[in-house]
Amino acid sequence: MAVHARPAAFEGLDGASYSADILTDTTGDDAAPWGAYLFFVQWGRGEPEALGHLETGFLVRGTSEEAVKRAAGQMSLLVVKATLDGLIRAREAGTPA
């Protein structure tokens, strides 16, 4: 995102296009009240139309929203792509992601 000023985009192992973003939310844990996770939007072919999404659980937890987003942003694109493919495999197997 820092290089191209837009979310990273990948082709998933299912052949669909996905964009990835880092989102944050409160965790409900007083010791680590903020968490960051990856959110993947699946795009349709042709006209840009969102068909669905996949998301991870919290990958990073911490005391501030800025800190967890920054920590998640340090993940390599190879790890992000592997995470997407794992979510696709789980979905195809009927396993809750």
Image (spheres, grey):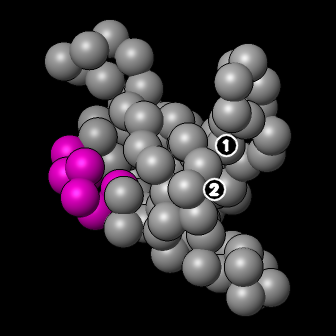
Q: Where are the magenta residues, as a range?
A: 74-80
- Residue 61 at x, y percent in the picture: 44, 58
Q: Quadrant of the N terminus?
A: top left
For this view, does 32 lie left or right of residue 88? left
Amino acid marked by disc 1: Gln
- Mark 2 or mark 1: name the one nearer the start of the chain: 1
79 above or below 97? above
The residue wearing badge 1 is 42
Report if residue 51 lies within the magenta region: no
Query: Could you tell me how many numbered marks the image carries?
Result: 2
The residue wearing badge 2 is 55
Secondary structure under the numbered disc 2 in the rendered image = strand
Report if residue 75 lies within the magenta region: yes
- Residue 72 at x, y percent in the picture: 33, 48
- Residue 63 at x, y percent in the picture: 41, 47
- Which-is-in-front pick, marks 2 and 1? 1
- Say which residue appears at 55% left-offset and 56% top-offset: 15
**Quick one: 19 or 46, which is closer to the camera?**
46
34 above or below 9? below
Secondary structure under the numbered disc 1 in the rendered image = strand
18 above or below 93? above
- Say which residue appears at 55% left-offset and 42% top-offset: 18
Residue 61 appearing in the image: no
* Residue that lies at the very extreme toward the top in this rendered image: 5
Amino acid marked by disc 2: Glu
